[in-house]
């Protein structure tokens, strides 16, 4: 019950979170009963961050890997959010440096059947 209450609170306040905290929230609820609702909120927030004309949000490769993994655990193909994350991977300055993050993203993409 506490988990559900906290997850509902995070969903309501998702618009206040930055990339790292969105990823942490998504990871925490992946595969849980409230996971679907949370992942919808995560997708909306990712697209809000992408469209924000004023603030520039910083997505680390670890944050991107965590988000891909959360979508894969939840088995959710949120096309717009996954496309945004894919673009972030392609546009990381210096490319992906951590092979662990590369492996997590590749595994997640395979589970989601995402190209």
Image (cartoon, grey):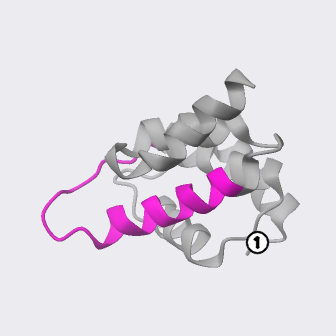
In the rendered image, residue 59 lying in the magenta stretch gets the answer: yes
Decide: few, some or many residues near mark 1? Use Cα within 10 Å; few <14, some 14-19, many ≥20.
some
Is residue 110 among the parts visible in the rendering?
yes
Residue at 72 percent across and 43 percent down: it is 104
- In the rendered image, residue 5, in percent from the top left (x then y), is placed at 63, 32
Q: Is residue 83 above or below residue 92?
A: below
Residues shaded magenta: 37-60
* Residue 115 horizontal side relative to residue 79, left or right: right
- The image shows a total of numbered marks equal to 1
Horizontal placement of 71 versus 62: left or right?
right
Q: Residue furthest left?
A: 54
Location of residue 85 in the rendering, given as x and y in whole percent from the top left corner: 53, 63
At 47% from the left edge and 48% from the top edge, which residue is drawn? Answer: 12
Above or below 65: residue 88? below
Instruction: Return the residue at label 1.
Output: 114
56 left or right, relative to 24: left
Q: Residue at x 84, y 71 (%)?
A: 113
Q: Is residue 106 positioned above or below 33 on the image?
A: below
The answer to which of 1 and 45 lies nearer the viewer is 1
For numbered disc 1, what is the local secondary structure? Answer: loop
Q: Is there any visible trace of residue 106 in the rendered image?
A: no
Examine the image and state in which quarter residue 6 appears.
top right
Quarter of the image with the C terminus in it: bottom right
Residue 29, image x, y percentages? 71, 38
Which residue lies at the image location 50% right of the left edge and 59% below the top edge?
A: 89
Q: Residue furthest top?
A: 2
Which quadrant, please, contains the N terminus? top right
**62 and 20: which one is in front?**
20
Q: Is residue 64 above or below residue 3?
A: below
Q: Is residue 40 magenta?
A: yes
């Amino acid at each position: 019950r506490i988990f559900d209450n906290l997850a509902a609170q995070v969903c309501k306040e998702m618009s206040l979170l930055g990339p790292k905290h969105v990823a942490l929230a998504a990871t925490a609820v992946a595969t849980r009963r409230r996971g679907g609702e949370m992942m919808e909120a995560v997708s909306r927030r990712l697209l809000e961050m992408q469209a924000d004309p004023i603030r520039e949000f910083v997505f680390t490769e670890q944050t991107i890997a965590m988000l891909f993994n959360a979508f894969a655990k939840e088995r959710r193909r949120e096309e717009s959010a996954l496309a945004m994350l894919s673009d972030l991977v392609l546009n990381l300055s210096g490319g992906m440096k951590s092979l662990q993050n590369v492996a997590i993203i590749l595994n997640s993409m395979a589970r989601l059947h995402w190209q």
